[in-house]
Amino acid sequence: MSQHKPAYVAACFDGRRDDVFRRALFPAYKQNRDAQPPELLALVPRAMTYLQALGCVSFRSPTHEGDDLMGSLSYMARALAPDVTTILVTEDKDMMCLVNDNTFVMHPRTLQIFDAAAVEAKLGVPPSLVADLLSLAGDPVDGIPGVKRVGPQTAVRLLKAFGSLDNLYDNLDEVAAVPNLRGAKTLAEKLRKEKENVWIYRSVVALACDVKLELPLSSSSSSSSSSSLIPFMEHLRYLGVDEVGGEALMEEAMGAKGVGKGPYLKLLKEQQKEQQRRSVPF
């Protein structure tokens, strides 16, 4: 916030993992992870309230994940103003599929910003092929197995040779001729046997960027609509921290006075300095 001073800001939360639409497509989705602690889920509404005190609107869906909501917001920003720069703060590599000339991914800890070149340098494929890559190679973090014995390097070579997952499956007879491909002679048959599963994986890893986003009741009782993008986006405009209610909320959230309030106090101090700078003495 301090470094980039965004005009708009929003946070997106996951809902209950068992209710996400991807479970209907692939029941094993994220089954490899520990269950979400109910006490943590119960705290999410309070976290959204605290973020509001920091000047940040939050979104959550019962059927979609935070990644889908972030993708939907980025699509909305692109539709509203193609020249606006969107930065998606996340360490989830799935989100790299959204990177383009005006949309970037920032790692929340290193603060590294990924453009299209950085995505390809990291994953081996451009943003447009990230979902294809994960469908073939799998994604252990989310419990996506991919094609057996097709690791990231093999998947990258296949996608570079054929250009896309669709074109790969349209030309399986040519896989054996791909140079420097381990097990090329038998790989086509493996891919053919796994075709149905691969397309299921593809539908699971693909982001849903058309989620109908509901504004918090404190911002508006109405939801977004295709005919009224600008008023919706104005609810995301960053106006600074809530100097009146923010202090009390931070005390409640963090306990002892001053503990864990660094980000709030830093933003408040910068906000007050900016107000002083803009004031014109008589």
Image (tube, rainbow, N blue to C red):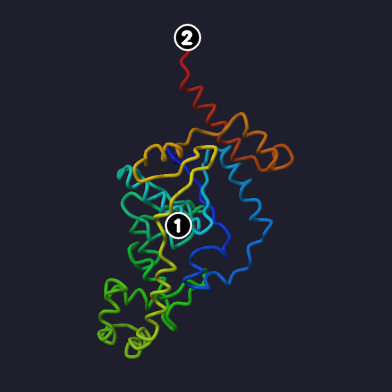
Query: Could you tell me the amino acid type at mark 1?
Result: Asp
- To which quarter of the image does residue 138 belong? bottom left
Q: Residue furthest right?
A: 256
Query: Could you tell me the amino acid type at mark 2?
Result: Phe
Q: Residue at 43% of width from left, 54% of height from top?
A: 211
Marks 2 and 1, Cα distance to the nearest angstrom?
51 Å
Mark 1 lies on a secondary structure that is helix
Pointer 2 local density, CA inside 10 Å: few below 14, some 14–19, many at least 20: few
Give residue 78's position: percent from left, percent from top. Answer: 33, 47
Q: Residue at 40% of width from left, 65% of height from top?
A: 206
**Which residue position holds label 2?**
282
**How many badges with numbers are in the image?**
2
Give residue 117's position: percent from left, percent from top. Answer: 33, 59
Q: Residue at 44% of width from left, 83% of height from top?
A: 148
Q: Earlier in the sequence, mark 2 or mark 1?
A: 1
Nearest to the observer: residue 156 or residue 78: 78
Pointer 1 local density, CA inside 10 Å: few below 14, some 14–19, many at least 20: many
Nearest to the observer: residue 78 or residue 278: 78
**Which residue position holds label 1?**
68
Give residue 278's position: percent from left, percent from top. Answer: 46, 22
The numbered dot on residue 21 is none
Examine the rendered structure and indicate whether residue 114 appears above or below residue 8.
below
Q: Residue at 45% of width from left, 44% of height from top?
A: 223
Taking the image as shown, residue 32 lies to the left or right of residue 148, namely: right
